[in-house]
Structures are given as structure tokens and as C-alpha cells.
Amino acid sequence: MADLQPNMEPTEGVITYPSGNTAVVACKQAAGYVVTFMSDSKNSQILASFDSKGVGGVNYPNGRPWLVVTESGYTLSDKKGNVVERIKFPRTSQEVITLEPTECISVRFTNRQSIVAVFSRPECRHEWQCGEALRRTEAPYTAKVVGTKEGGRLELDVAAIRQRQQAVGSVYVPPGPHRTETERPGIGSLKKALRNLDPASDLSATVSELRNLDTRLGYIETLPRVLYGTARSASAGTLARGTIGSSGGGSGGNLGATTASLVMGSSGRMVLEDYGSPELSKTQRRFASSLRGLDPEKVRHKARRAKLPWMRLRDLDSAVWGATAPGDTLQVLCVLADWNPVCAKVEAVLEAAHGALVEEAAARSGCEAARVKMWKVDASEGNLLQDRYGFKTVPMLLMFYEGKLVAATNNVRTEAQARDAALGALMRGRKREVLPEGWRFGTGADNSLLDYLKPSTVLREL
């Protein structure tokens, strides 16, 4: 129970009437006070109650609502319960509404941020400031040097300014880290600082070692990144070939000793010929000794399929159609798409046929198989071939002899059919039996492969 003393500051706890009944229950929270006023009766009827947000109300002694405050507005009612005033926040009028449920309890309401609840008796007086407390009105950042007058008008408090100058020495806050400005702040300042290092310092030697390490790491052969699709897409080989000239452009460090041991890697970029022999720990050496190496004398499985080399659309003019096309050579353009399940099946057949032709050409020089070159063209790269020859489905095989179209088909289901189609087109090309200039597929004529597909096979048009 709180002690009853006159002119007392807002208190926290329970205040009772002389009869022993509870009068006020006040609870202090971080956002403000929660106050509840009760009548001097055995049933302790609630007469007024407000929380820290200013939400609550005041009741008549008979229990009917008098003032009801919500987050959106407030209502005033008469003793019969009829609403006489209904206002939504923000309230424009600054008139104070005074309510006195009993002679001991009074409430002065202006808005949800300004509610004064008073409990007074001859021997004591308690006053609580209820409602939502705004941060700026609670303690403005100009409170040290600016005084507030009526209507919110601010005025310089000269006395406070002079007092702070005498106590602190300055009105402003002490200068922070932003006062110190680097020679070149932000990105790039480290490079400029390293250029000004003493070459004989230990830090300069460490930086040189890190640069050499970064250069060596840049020459390690890794899997090429692809623009889309998988590692078998057209963009994989292109991106790898495009990095040949830029492999050592901006690496920095000591490149003289490194470039002497560079060789062309399988991915089409310059890599280190010898990566060196790192020092192994005792555990690593013991593990390495337990590994069984490959037996070179043992005959191992040799794949019959050979991966088809890529041909970009931009290279067709010079490699296939132009005057620089190789003579007495049949070039087979296999138009495929990685996202098409039919192409995945046909590509395996074409790779097997390509492997057989390469193996035969290596065994017998000058044979007909040596005059057949097979290329893979990504159908997703562009519609150049589709628009020129009028086909819409993939896979599609276009066979050219010295820049002239000899045959075009997608009716290839086995390795033997692919081989026979290529060698037959080579013979017709030598006899100058080529398709006429401007030849195009007729409507539906490029779907001969559809007659041999299963009903469950998915075929997508471009």
C-alpha cells in the first residue's frame, strides 16, 4: 500500500480508501502508467481505467460508460447511455474535457497523448499522466539549447547555451571518426596504400607472395562455367575459349616465371603445365602409399562414342557456307537441344556414329570416313537455320558438301542409319546431286521422326 501524503508524485502500487476498499491500482511500465480507479464500495466498481497507449474510459457511478477511448477515436455518452459525441483521431480541438465520476476522482482528457487522472482527498493528492508518450515530445534533441513556447514555437534558450559552453566548452558534440579523412576513401584505397609501401618491408613481401599465389590459382584448370543448360551446352566451350586471351591480363604479381610453364588445357584455356609438389603431412604420405595406382598394362574399357564438337551460328558463314569451307568434305550439322528428351536419345546415336567414323579414319587414311565432319549446333542459340530451311522440330541433321545442302533429315534412330546417311550424302555431293538453292521444308515434312516415337515420348517445338 502506498503511503498517503499530500502533493505526492505519481506513484506505483495500491491506494485504499479510509474504509479499506481499493481506490487506485497503478502499475508503471516502460511506455507509461496503467491506472485503474475504483468506487468506495464492496463490489469495487471500476470508474476509470487507462493503459500506456491512452486506451480506456471513464464510467458513471451507475456503471454506464461516460468516455470511451480507442486507438481510432473516442465517444462521449450521457447518463442514459446515448452517444452525444463521436470523434476520430487526430482531434483538432484542444479543449479539455473534464470528467468527475466521484468527488475523489477526476479525469482531464484532451487527446490520446494527453490524459491526466487525479485522485485527491484532504490528506493526499496523486496525479498520473496517462496516454501514449511520443518520443519527440518526451525529450526532443533540441531540449538542451532550445526552449518551447505555446503553440510549439521554439525559441533559443540563451542561458542554457551559455551554461553548456561554460561546462563543456562547446555546444556541439565531440568530433567523431568522420572527421578523419583518408587519402582515397572507399574502394581502391587498399591498392593505393600498397603502392606506397616500402619494398623492403615484411608486409610488402607478404603481399607479393599473395599475388603470386593468386596468379597460380588463376591458371588452375577447372570446369568451365556455362551460360545456360548443362556442361554440354554451346556456351560451355565458347566461354572457355573466350578466356584464353584474358587469363593473365589483370592478375598482377610476378608473371614472368609463370607464363613460361603455361600450356593449352583441355577446356581451351591456358593452364599450368606443372602444379608443383606440395609438402604432405605424415598422415597424407601414409594414405598416398596405400593407394593403388593404375596398371598401364591392363586393358580397360574404351568408349565407342565420341563427343560432337560445337559449331556456333556465327561461324557457319566461314566454316560451312563460305569460300573457306573445306573441299571434298561432308559437314553434318546436328541441330540439337539439351532440354528436348528426343534429342538426348538421338545425340547418343550420333556420338556413336561419330566415334566409329573417327576410329575408321584413324585406322585407314584417305578413306571416305575421313571426309565426314560432324558438328553439334545448339538449337536454343538462335533461329538462323530454322528460318532458312523451314523446319520447326529438333533434332535435325543438315548435310553440306562444299557449302551446298545435300540432304536434310531427322529420320535417324540407329548408329548404322546415321553412318549410312552421312556416307550416302558424301557420294551425292561428289556427284553434285545437291538440293536447289533456296530449298525449304514443306509444312509437316520435317516430322518424319515422329512416326517412330513412342506415345509417351515428349517432343517440343522451338
Image: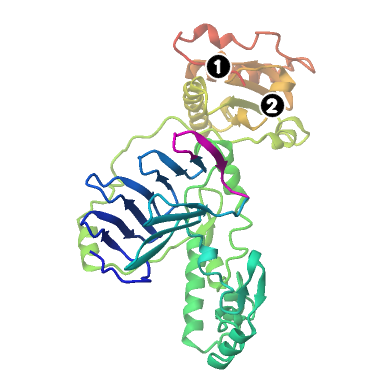
Residue kind at label 1, given as amino acid type? Asp
Quadrant the N terminus occupies: bottom left
Quadrant the C terminus occupies: top right
Q: Is residue 91 left or right of residue 39?
A: right
Looking at the picture, how far across and down is residue 57, in whole percent?
Answer: 42, 46
Q: Which circle's residue, 1 or 2, is located before the other in the chain?
A: 2
Residue kind at label 2, given as amino acid type? Asn
Q: Residues within 10 Å of mark 1 (few under 14, many from 20)?
A: few
Name the mark on residue 420: 1
Tag 2, which secondary structure?
loop
Residue on which disc 2 sits: 383
The answer to which image quadrant residue 314 occupies is top right
Name the mark on residue 230: none
Q: Is residue 44 magenta?
A: no
45 or 201: nearer the eye?
45
Q: Are marks 1 and 2 in contact (CB under 8 Å)?
A: no
Q: Using the numbered discs, state the Cα–Cα distance from disc 1 to disc 2 in whole angstroms.
A: 28 Å
Q: Is residue 89 magenta?
A: yes
